[in-house]
Image (spheres, rainbow, N blue to C red):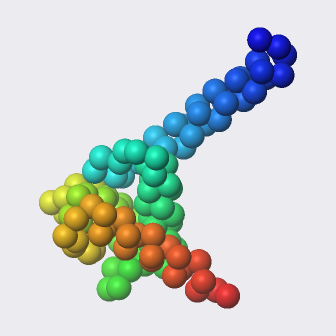
Amino acid sequence: MNTIEKDLERRQEDYKRYNEEEFKKNKININVRLNGDNKYYHAFQCALFTENLLKYGYDNITKEEIKNNGISFDKYCINLGYNKYCRDLKRFSSKQEMLGFVIGYNEAMSHKNI
């Protein structure tokens, strides 16, 4: 192996390590399994959703309540609190429906200030 190949391999390993660290950080309040190629994207979207709720609140739930209780993501719901037995923010029929809602909400919020 030449120097360029070794450097590329090292960078690739660094990139993988960084992605895994970010994934673990973003997945802290997700209580559903994320797998496949999109797991990093979905974990990032859930973290962004949490940031948006902390910034704007949600429906009749204030940002202070969200800050105090936290948010958790489960297979069929998003909750105010750290497990599926806490107050529901929103309920879903499937994990994919929940993730689709989170992504759509984030997209809408990204255009809020335009």
Q: Split into 4 quadrants, where in the image is the N terminus?
A: top right
Q: Quarter-wise, where is residue 58 in the image?
A: bottom left
Residue 69, visible in the rendered structure: no
Give the farthest residue toward the top: 1
Image x and y of residue 77, in percent: 23, 66
Q: Nearer the viewer, residue 88 or 110?
A: 110
Please report the residue visible at 50 percent of the width from the left and 73 percent of the height from the top: 106
- Relative side of 93 to 59, left or right: left
Q: Quarter-wise, where is residue 105 in the image?
A: bottom left
Please report the residue visible at 45 percent of the width from the left and 70 percent of the height from the top: 103
Answer above or below: position of 10 versus 2: below
Answer above or below: position of 51 versus 114: above
Give the farthest residue toward the right: 3
Give the farthest residue toward the front: 1
- Relative side of 107 to 30, left or right: right
Residue 105, visible in the rendered structure: yes
Image x and y of residue 8, in percent: 75, 27
Image x and y of residue 100, in percent: 38, 70
Please report the residue visible at 25 percent of the width from the left and 58 percent of the height from the top: 74
Q: Split into 4 quadrants, where in the image is the C terminus?
A: bottom right
Image x and y of residue 70, in percent: 36, 61
Q: Nearer the viewer, residue 68 or 53?
A: 53
Q: Nearer the viewer, residue 108 or 25?
A: 108
Please report the residue visible at 31 percent of the width from the left and 58 percent of the height from the top: 72
